[in-house]
Amino acid sequence: MFHKILIANRGEIAVRLIHACHELGVQAVAVYSEADADARFVRMADEAVLIGPPAATESYLKADAIIQAALETGAEAIHPGYGFLAENAAFARAVQDAGLTFIGPPPEAIAAMGDKAAARRRMEAAGVPITPGYQGEDDDRALADAARRIGFPVLVKAAAGGGGKGMRVVWEEADLDESLAAARREARHAFGDDRLIVEKFVPRAHHVEFQILADGHGHTVHLFERECSVQRRYQKIIEETPSPLLDPDLRARMGQAAVAAARAVGYVNAGTVEFIVDPDTRAFYFLEMNTRLQVEHPITEMVTGLDLAQWQIRIAAGEPFPYRQEDLQQQGHALECRVYAEDPASGFLPSTGELLLARFPQGPGIRVDAGVESGDAITHHYDPLIAKIIVHAEDRDAAIRRMTYALRQTALHGVITNTAFLLDVLAHPDFRAGRADTKWVDRELADWRPEAGPEDLILAALALSDLLPATAQPVAAPAGPDPYSPWKRG
Amino acid sequence: MPAYQHNARTYNLTLIPVGEGYRVEVDGRIIVVEAVEPRPEGLRIRLDGRWHTVYVGRAGKTRWVTHAGRAFRFEQAAPRGRRGRSGGGGGDGQVRSPMPGQVRAVHAASGDAVSQGQTLMLLEAMKMEIRIQAPCEGIVEAIHADEGAVVEKDQVLVLVRCGMEDEKAGE
């Protein structure tokens, strides 16, 4: 086992990975930008190294500075988390060339899955179902010809892409030119690579992904699915497992395909094979493979009882994974809600500011993965994820009840968040019935507004608020009754 | 008498201590608060015989109130009788940045005729592309931020003179 690991990430995932290190008795080194100097993950780490100014391109994407920090602190391995450099094959290779261990798949596997067009060809060769599509010469005319041949609607997406960046649904030919231009612009900004591919678009598709885990001794298993259809513009909002759409037969076939996909690229460590599923035909198609730990990995941890972050580290250290496929099962039902600093009533506009209050839920079967505490700032430099609330319960209804209870305990002040929106999704008949597809939020909830204005209780609290001490800087909870309480007067 | 705004609606509030509780008047309507206890992050309030936990936060003129996972943000407003906007707001044709970010592209130039909702600028913030749109039909008077510029929330990005006057834009 390693003695010291450098975490090349920030926010909630850095916190999550530091927990994994500390549980395994490994020291954790954080790297941070100037904007994160006081962040929770920096405070938790055994050592922390400043690597640059706030902009990600000058800090969390600076491979050289990160590797240098690992060498200087004596870390033996680097965990990239998700986003930033996690799926950058050149970074993984540079880490190895520096004599360090990259906690993730081999650079060749990252590269094979990172080029979406090449990945589709390899998957097809490995017998993994793929959507009808086009991945040839990348000029606008060839793409337009392909789109006509496949038939609208089509999906235009970045060849180097992921996370919905540079991705556009084109419903009719008239919109194609504009969509190609927009997708190229986004792809160039997001990945520095504006090559595009075109695919058949499956309306009402569900996004169902399979977690796989492969050790360095040739043993590969899947850890079942995650249903991630509640998303907006490809940004996931709620994930759950098991998927309400799958039955044991479809689950087994998709699981086998996921394992075949991983084996086809010589995959080692944790990865996720994403599929879209047509709810009418129950056909499934390979979408892409994410060669890293996913944001939503905790729900898999809840139902399988496995600690994925720790297994990533243990596999990288050379340990064999001891469980066979038939040893693994899904126990109960898990849900994750992503709490974002954004305003669903104003087109999901991100909201920035200082968190005057961050109160997260507690109770049986409730887990919160958060990168922030009261007093921390939510800045425009990084993504708007504040926390992930994860629940585990005996079945889907119980999990929805538990999540509702958890969200009702949550209070975040200083930035606008989506908690009320999440509560409304959980209560929606379509969600209850497991009918939400990947366009459901955009279609049904684009004009979402809070159910009502402030009720009497809220207005009463507002009127009473001026009696409370100002909380520009939140103060710790007093240990006992406050002798100077204004409530004692008069 | 404090007044607060939420979603463009103003609430005029009066608080009168009554016994162990309070009487809250909201624009003439009465809410009876039977009892109140302070909490580190807010209040416990008894209404109609039931206790509720409400989280309350203050920062400058902003008030945050959350109950059961639903948060409301209020801004202290001028009390009733003093109508009219003071700074901050949109004004006539001042296009302000909705949040801090970086200008990715500028799609209009000084002197351009623009239609309402036309994209004038693309702003990138928190990995999202945000369209800055013309608030009205009119003529662009000035562009105040170039491509690549880092802008603050509420910074004026573009000035549009609303209305088309006589001359026709385009053909």
Image (tube, coloured by chain):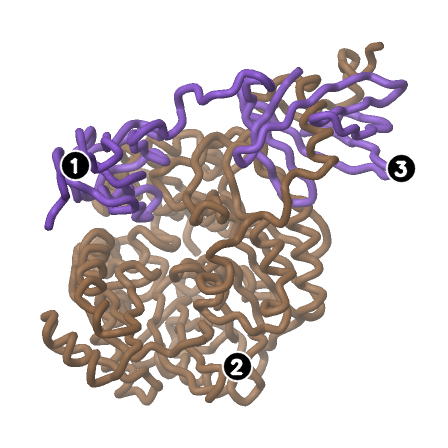
Q: Position of residue A112 (x, y in %)?
A: 24, 72
Q: Residues within 10 Å of mark 1 (few under 14, many from 20)?
A: few
Residue A172 placement, left or right of A380: left
Is A65 left or right of A225, judged from the image as shown?
left
| Number of dots carrying numbers | 3
| Residue at 21%, 37% in the rendered image | B164
Task: Give amino acid for label 2.
Answer: Gln
Residue at 62% in and 54% down: A423
In the rendered view, tell whether residue B151 sits above or below residue A14: above
Please name the residue that numbered disc 2 is placed on.
A325
A236 vs B143: above or below: below
Instruction: Give the number of the disc on residue B166.
Output: 1
- Measured from the top left, where is residue A401 in percent x and y? 71, 60
Question: Is the residue A85 above or below the residue B25 in the image?
Answer: below
Mark 2 secondary-structure assignment: helix
Which-is-in-front pick, marks 2 and 3? Answer: 3
User: Would you identify the image quadrant in which residue A390 lies?
Assistant: bottom right
